[in-house]
Amino acid sequence: MRLKHIAIIGSLFPILFSIVLFFGVLISAEDDDGGGNYSSSFIGMNLSAEVLKHRPMVEKYAKEYGISEYVNVLLAIMQVESGGTAVDVMQSSESLGLPPNSLDTESSIKQGCKYFASLLDSCEAQGIKDLHVAIQSYNYGGGYVRYVAGKGKKHTFTLAENFAREKSGGKKVTYTNPIAVAKNGGWRYGYGNMFYVELVNLYLTVTHFDNATVQKIMNEALKYQGWKYVYGGSNPNTSFDCSGLTQWCFGKAGISIPRTAQAQYDATQHLPLSQAQAGDLVFFHSTYNAGSYVTHVGIYVGNNQMYHAGDPIGYADLTSSYWQAHLIGAGRIKQ
């Protein structure tokens, strides 16, 4: 049975300051928080059009190598490796011992899938159940699997850093990615990229929730990801507007809530966003002239993200300047 675990991580923030701020909080804390305790129910997010156009071929070869459940991880890896624009789109030439950029696009995807499958197998053979080990090993090579196997069987940033330090002989290079700037001022060791897991996780979000009711709500909501926003829409026959989506999805979980965003706000216990939990609603004002104070609502999913009827329906980053300017706060259904 292949690995089934991934850590929940925040999305890619469109505002540079927000990136730095979020990751400053995230990875300045004790880093022994590898991804071994979470479900593998995850989806890709913020993937570029250049990456997404390769999805059919990734699905083809992921299926061939028995790792179809990891398509979104493979796409996130592609996003980090090349943004979908290089010919060797998964930068997998070196895993064959070839010079960089030796493979054509289809061969690159095929080898990238094959290589990742081999890393998953290696982790399984070593008793490692942390998907992050396989992800970091895509960058470092299979030696990282063996390294982690002897040091707790769980990826941490400290292990990734120590591995790179040993392999590079302690040589540091400037690295101005905001994640690195927030963590150490802007450097990495000159072997691979010790921030690789953090980079890949920017393009993933988890869709498994510990609370069964929240899971029912989100299982229903995710059916409509990518659907267009329709003002006045309140069911799958019409598509949805913001409050139509929340009312429908909560209803499918056995929870009756009012129809409009204002009425939903009035029916909830109001909370600051800092106290919100997955499954709470999050409310906004002045997103358009609705004749009411509350004009938009979404479902809070954790890590400063919401799922809502935008255009299209999907996830949004609550730290963006737009949502921060219109944020009212969270609301918890009174039951």
Image (tube, rainbow, N blue to C red):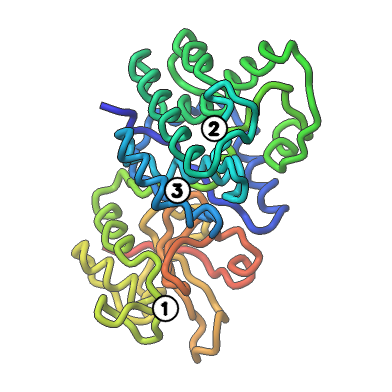
**How far is the residue under mark 2 from the one under mark 3?**
24 Å
Q: Which mark is residue 92?
A: 2
**Quarter of the figure with residue 167:** top right
> Few, some or many C-alpha atoms within 10 Å of disc 2 (few <14, some 14-19, many ≥20)?
many
Q: Secondary structure at mark 1?
A: loop
* Dot 1 or dot 3, earlier in sequence: 3
Residue 244, position as x, y percentages in the image = 33, 77
Q: Residue furthest top?
A: 150
Above or below, 263 relative to 118:
below
**Disc 2 or disc 1, which is closer to the eye?**
2
Left or right? Give the position of 305 relative to 16: left
The three-letter amino acid code for the residue at tag 2 is Ser
Q: Is residue 7 visible?
A: yes
Residue found at the far bottom of this picture: 291
Name the residue: 48% across, 55% down: 52
Q: CA distance from mark 2 to mark 1?
A: 39 Å
Q: Which residue is mark 3?
A: 205
Q: Nearer the viewer, mark 2 or mark 3?
A: 2
- Whichever of labels 2 and 1 marks the residue nearer the N terminus, that label is 2
Q: Amino acid at mark 1?
A: Tyr
Q: Which residue is mark 1?
A: 229
Residues 275 and 27: in front is 27
What residue is drawn where x is 79% and y is 26%?
173
Of the pair 326 and 101, the residue shown nearer to us: 101
Residue 39 in the image, given as x and y percentages of width and height:
33, 38
